[in-house]
Structures are given as C-alpha cells and as structure tokens.
Amino acid sequence: MQYETIIAIRMPTSLSIGIRRIASYLSALLLTTLPLQASKLSPFAQIEALEIRECSGIAKSRQYESVYWTHNDSGSGSAIYAIRSNGELIAAIDTHLPNIDWEDATVDSSGGLFLADTGNFENTRRDLVIHRISEPNPSVPNDSLEISSYPFVYPDQTAFPPMKRQFDCEALFWAQGRLHLLTKSLGDTYTRLYRFDALHENRINRPSFVARFDIGPRVTAAEASMDGNRLAILTTRSVWVFDKPDDSSDFFQGPAFTRSIQAGQCEAICWEDESTLLVANEGRDLYRIPIDTLIEY
C-alpha cells in the first residue's frame, strides 16, 4: 500500500520559491500529516488499434473535432494514430520518420503536431530531436506530410553521460506560444522545465532552463490547457495540475493540485476539456480524471 503526504499551504506569490519551500518544511513540523492512499483507477475504454504496442503520448487535435493523436514508443514503427476519446481508431498514418525513442506529443495553435524523440535513459544521446508535422486530415488519404525537424541539446549538459542522469525526457507541451520540455531525472527527484524561445531547422537548438520542482515520482507526460494557463503533469504514481502565475512563465510558482493514482504504467496525458484529463497507459487503457478530484498541494 502506497501513501503520499499532502499538506495544504498557501503562500503569497511575492515570496520566492526558496522561501516558500522553507516555510512549507517548517509548517510540516507543526501540522499533523494525513496519509493519502493512491486511488486505483478503472479504465472507461481502450485504444482498439493493436498496432499500438506501447502507447507513449497523446494529444488532442486543435484542427479536427474529437480527434486525438497517439503513437508508439521506440521499436514499434513510425506511424501516428488518430483516435476518438473512446479508443476508436480513425486512421494510422506513416510519417516515415525514424523512431529512436518517441516519448510524447503535443499540438500548437497553428496546426502543428509535435513528436518528441527525446527518450534518453542513459543520458548519452547527441541526436535528440523534435519533429513538427502539419496536422493531416485523418479522414482522407495522406501520401505526403509537411514535416520540420528541430535537433537540440540541453544547455547545461556537458558530459555524456553526466554524473547524475537528469536529461531523460518524456514530457512535451505547448504553452504561451512556445514549446516546453519537462525532464525525467534518474539522478534525483526533480523535474526540470525548459522552454524553446525559437525553433530552427538548420542548426542545433538550445532551450532555456526555466525552473525545477521536486515532484518525487518520475515524470512520464505533460500537457498544457488550450489557453496555456494550466499545466497537467503525469508521473509514475500521480497527476499534478499547476496554475501559471500572471507575472511569470514558471508554472511551479503557481498554485498546485495533485492526486496519487494506480493505473498501470501511465505514459500519456492530455486535456479532454477544461475540467477533465485523459490519461493512457502503455497497455492502451484510457482513464478520465476530473480536475476537481485533485487536492491542493
């Protein structure tokens, strides 16, 4: 039986995140903590496409009504799959892109579907890349796709591998007109937020480091709300939602809400609507998580 401790603490946003953490720690010494049992979720549907052997990312289309894009992890081909929220397969479209280790997908506000070839378990990869595909119409044949590729490196990685493996990544999201990454650290309990201020095809991109957060379990997916003001993060044992502060691009400085879950190896998350998250595990099971079931952190 797994338990996590949740303490509700409200601090003025003018305080730095360091001061807030110290205050949280001191408050924890004074308050009685309540164990929270991870809730076991029941799937409401399953992705019907058997070709999806290991569902690794999901994104809701902004171009086509009730369409969701999903994909496999490494070693399972280069197709993207258009599905309904009930798991019904609409189309399988081969991108003909190399799939070294696709880990997540997201969409932008101008018809782009991004695929994150960012899996980096050993932290030795020098070929990290994000692909952008102009969203194809899943209801018609697609003989060719409009694709752009953006190679990148982390600005703070100087050794391959580093002493601490903190440059794996399974989470990609679009917010406030920019692409973001969240790392899955294997060397500590932090996730690190990076932001691409621009994307270039013909040279190496270096995202800006924004902030880090001690999230505990490893991050496996993320997605921002349609307006970019809320960030949902999926870990191996929990779901988080952060509200972006008005005066900062650091989601981690805003109010946070969380819930512990048990649903197999969950690897994909997106917003079904403004009040509901859609989560998928590697076994293609689909779960709905209402936002109002999360607890303020």
Image: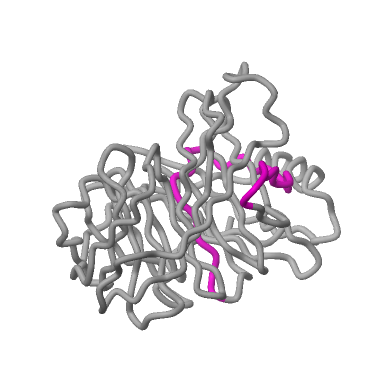
Name which residue lies at 64% across and 37% down.
153
- Quarter of the figure with residue 46: bottom left
Of residues 222 and 257, the one nearer the viewer is 222
* Residue at far front of view: 143
Q: Work out whether residue 291 or residue 57 is closer to the camera in this orientation and state it.
A: 57
Residue 137 placement (x, y as % from top left): 34, 76
Left or right side of 17 for 269:
left
Q: Residue at x 46, y 68 (%)?
A: 134
Vertical position of residue 96 compared to residue 167: above or below: below
Horizontal and vertical percent for residue 35?
Answer: 45, 45
Q: Is residue 151 left or right of residue 136?
A: right
Residue 14, percent from left and from top: 85, 59
User: Which residue is drawn at the image coordinates 59% and 41% (left, top)?
Assistant: 191
Number of residue marks: 0
Residue 161: x and y, percent? 57, 19
Identify the coloring.
Answer: one colour
Residue 92: quadrant of the picture:
bottom left
- In the picture, which quadrant includes the N terminus? top left
Farthest residue, direction right: 14
Q: Nearer the viewer, residue 17 or 169?
A: 169
Seen as rendered, the residue at the extreme bottom is 65
Q: Is residue 223 magenta?
A: yes
Q: Nearer the viewer, residue 37 or 60?
A: 60
Magenta span includes 154: no
Please, which residue is most extreme toward the top here? 163
Residue range in magenta is 201-226
Residue drawn at x 38%, y 54% is 57
